[in-house]
Image (spheres, rainbow, N blue to C red):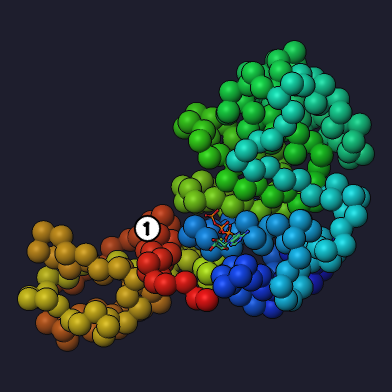
């Protein structure tokens, strides 16, 4: 049932103001159905606010937010049952046993898929008789993901799901997500600050900054927008305000390192005209590209 206007999330001029702070600023965001979409942003970019509005926990100040085609402010329990949500807190009743929680969820969700549950929980050493409160953080994350995937939600929102997990638990979590075929008939929204995870799982990279959409493309296409130039420039080099697309500059071992956005080979010419002797371009990782992009405005004062 996919048509070209089938968006799982659609916002139009969505704004949220908390007192003097504008957390979402006329945000127009359209996330198509299917695949894994990463949403990244610096602290305070508005990600949690966006999800609070989308889940109907909070009204917007202005604009419109739709989730699975419904107005987020009038979601019914049935609409909500089409959405799975896993966050870093992995909130489940601590006093209940794993088997009890599983049975309860099985009865609650008509589309429950036992095979999906078994294949994910199989990555973890979780016993049915254990109480939720006795599980380790990684086991609780895995249990939560297994429950969420078994609901067979149309939309699964994962908000920093691997925060605080060790390397082994993180790997198990990502493998569960990838190998459960979640992306086949379920759209996954993955909010994380961990670029190596995003590089591994995401098909689409959404960057939010100060409540505005700054990028929506395949992660590798974003990386291709950022280039790293190393130049041997005598003295101070060009005035920084004249460097086109500048994200970051560093001086290391007497060489200038420039990270720039949306520049082509003309940038080499710019450096040479500025007196650079040796100029080389180097590949950039997604982590470096996103961090340089986000840091550029990080220290600037917030819009009131
Ligand atoms: N209840 C509130 N009252 C006032 N300001 C708020 C409130 N909730 C959020 N904010 C502000 O709105 C902005 C966006 O916050 P939000 O929690 O949505 O960001 P975030 O992208 O989820 O950040 P993080 O990555 O740090 O969790 C921040 O500047 C924050 O200080």
In this picture, is 77 found above or below 68? Answer: above
Q: Which residue is mark 1?
A: 288
Residue beneath the point at 11% across and 76% down = 236
Residue in view at x 87 percent, y 58 percent:
75
x, y percent for residue 159 = 62, 48
Residue 176 visible in the current orientation: no
Q: Residue at x 69, y 78 (%)?
A: 13
**Residue 304 image position (x, y, % from top left):** 52, 76
Q: Residue 130: in sight, yes or no?
A: yes
For mark 1, give the secondary structure. helix
* Of residues 215 and 48, the one drawn nearer to the viewer in this rendering: 48
Identify the residue at horizontal 32%, vertical 75% (top origin): 246
Q: Nearer the viewer, residue 170 or 93?
A: 93
Residue 143 lies left or right of residue 270; in this view the side is: right
Q: Residues within 10 Å of mark 1 (few under 14, many from 20)?
A: some
| Mark 1: C-beta under 8 Å from nearest atom of ligand 1 | no
């Amino acid at each position: 049932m996919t048509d070209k206007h089938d968006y799982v999330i659609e916002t139009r001029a969505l704004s949220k103001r908390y007192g003097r702070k504008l957390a979402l600023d006329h945000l127009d965001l359209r996330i198509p159905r299917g695949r894994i979409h990463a949403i990244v942003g610096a602290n305070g970019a508005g990600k949690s606010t966006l999800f609070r509005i989308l889940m109907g926990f909070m009204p917007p100040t202005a604009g419109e937010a739709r989730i699975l085609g419904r107005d987020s402010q009038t979601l019914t329990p049935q609409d909500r049952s089409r959405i799975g949500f896993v966050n870093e807190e992995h909130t489940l009743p601590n006093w209940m046993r794993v088997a009890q929680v599983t049975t309860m969820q099985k009865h609650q969700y008509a589309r429950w898929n036992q095979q999906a549950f078994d294949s994910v929980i199989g990555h973890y050493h979780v016993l049915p008789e254990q109480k939720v409160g006795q599980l380790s953080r990684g086991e609780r994350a895995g249990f939560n993901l297994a429950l969420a995937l078994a609901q067979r939600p149309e939309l699964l929102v994962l908000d920093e799901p691997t925060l605080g997990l060790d390397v082994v638990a993180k790997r198990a979590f990502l493998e569960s997500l990838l190998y459960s075929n979640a992306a086949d008939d379920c759209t996954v929204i993955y909010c994380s600050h961990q670029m190596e995870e995003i590089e591994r799982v995401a098909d689409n990279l959404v960057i939010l900054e100060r409540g505005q959409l700054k990028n929506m493309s395949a992660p590798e296409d974003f990386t291709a927008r950022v280039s790293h130039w190393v130049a041997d420039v005598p003295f101070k080099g060009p005035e920084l305000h004249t460097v086109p697309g500048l994200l970051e500059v560093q001086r290391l071992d007497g060489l200038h390192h420039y990270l720039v956005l949306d520049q082509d080979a003309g940038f080499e010419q710019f450096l040479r005209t500025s007196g650079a002797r040796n100029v080389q371009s180097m590949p950039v990782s997604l982590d470096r590209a996103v961090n340089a992009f986000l840091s550029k405005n990080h220290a600037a004062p917030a819009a009131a």
